[in-house]
Amino acid sequence: MVKTIEMVNGVVRMLDQSRLPLEVRYIECTDYRMVAEGIKRLWIRGAPAIGIAAAMGIAIGAQGIRASGFREFMDSLEPIFETMLSTRPTAVNIQWAVDRIKRGLNERSDEPVENLKRFLVEEANRMLQEDIEVNRAIGRWGAEFIKDGDTIITHCNAGSLATGGYGTATAPIRVAVEEGKRIHVIADETRPVLQGARLTAWELMQDDIPVTLITDNTAGALMQRGEIDLAIVGTDRTVANGDVANKIGTYSLAILCKEHGIPFFVAAPLSSIDFSIPSGQYIPIEERSPEEVTTVFGCRVAPEGVKVRNLAFDVTPARYITGIITERGVFRPEDIHRLQDPSADIEALRLRPER
Ligand code: MRU
């Protein structure tokens, strides 16, 4: 499996996903601003991966701070937090990482600054390791819903490239394959940035997982022909009522699944669930540059001056979602808010496949 990101000796090394699959090139970020630039420019992308990248950026940015005590250190960190938070608005994982880091630092308010700096490096590396474990757990729970011979459609890239490794939407697929099930993946190409074509197809082929690439508008026709059994996608932010923000086109795919009676699953690590937002209409949706739509790899495909809307994400209402696959199990979207309740009977809430 390819390595998406790592931090070695104060340098954040990220695979430049904007070049894939034509070129496998790593970029070494020696400065937190460069990490932020990498997140903005999609050198690294995918909700969990940008959360980890932000944590690593904060860790390397903190090393240069001169502060005599806790308060001064926290004040100097604030612009670094803000820089990371200003990169991409929809995925909640950057906010999740910043909140977790602040909590950890506040618990160490009586420690010397050198310890706080060391903590930031250790915490960022911990997030990377934990993310891989979380993905594997998502894989184990989700694979229960996959049958031998299934054809599974996915949208965008919620694979190892979008995470610390292993992937979220691809995790159940990987586990199913490891269990010996014969699986075929249909990858939507995912206009305008083509994460499905450039990233999902590429990474599955690297691991010999059978994959067929389609244009986004082919999904309905394949469903009509009975060629798709299941859909699994990732999420940038899932909220308390079970509404899900994910790459633009996810909503249309979910409606198609509903029409054809195809189960539609969302793989969502807890780091991508925002319990503070009651429903999807409040999720900030990133709008990106018109050039992503009017050009393809630098080549203009639309008339000069044409008006463009380029929403990077959409919101799929909970009613279209069969189950949300988390590291704690698979749940109905309407039950997802119960995960924040320590007294909830998680076992009773878990969705299990019909046998
Ligand atoms: O714009 P991107 O490429 O960052 O969008 C990524 C997605 O929409 C993914 O599906 C989502 O982040 C889940 S990644 C496990």
Image: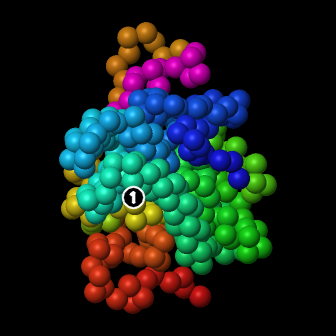
Taking the magenta stretch, the answer to whether it contains residue 144 is no
**Quarter containing the C terminus:** bottom right
Which residue sits at x=39%, y=58%? 272
Q: Position of residue 320 (x, y in %)?
A: 39, 64
Question: Ligand 1 near label 1 (Cβ, under 8 Å)?
Answer: yes
Residue 264 visible (yes or no): no
Q: Position of residue 293 (x, y in %)?
A: 46, 25
Q: Which amino acid type is marked by label 1?
A: Ser
326 left or right of 211 in image? left
Q: Nearer the viewer, residue 50 or 294?
A: 50
Which residue sits at x=51%, y=63%? 130
Secondary element type, mark 1:
helix
Taking the magenta stretch, the answer to whether it contains residue 289 is yes
233 left or right of 218 in image? left
Which residue sits at x=38%, y=75%? 332
Q: Nearer the viewer, residue 267 or 65?
A: 65
Q: Position of residue 236 (x, y in %)?
A: 40, 51
The quadrant in which residue 242 appears is bottom left
Q: Is residue 36 above or below residue 97?
A: above
What span is in magenta? 285-299
159 left or right of 69 in image? right
Q: Is residue 166 above or below residue 149?
A: above
Q: Position of residue 157 (x, y in %)?
A: 56, 48
The quadrant in which residue 190 appears is top right
Residue 302 visible (yes or no): yes
Q: Is residue 150 above or below residue 156?
A: below
How many callouts does the rendering have? 1
Which residue sits at x=47%, y=25%? 292
**Residue with the mark numbered 1:** 272
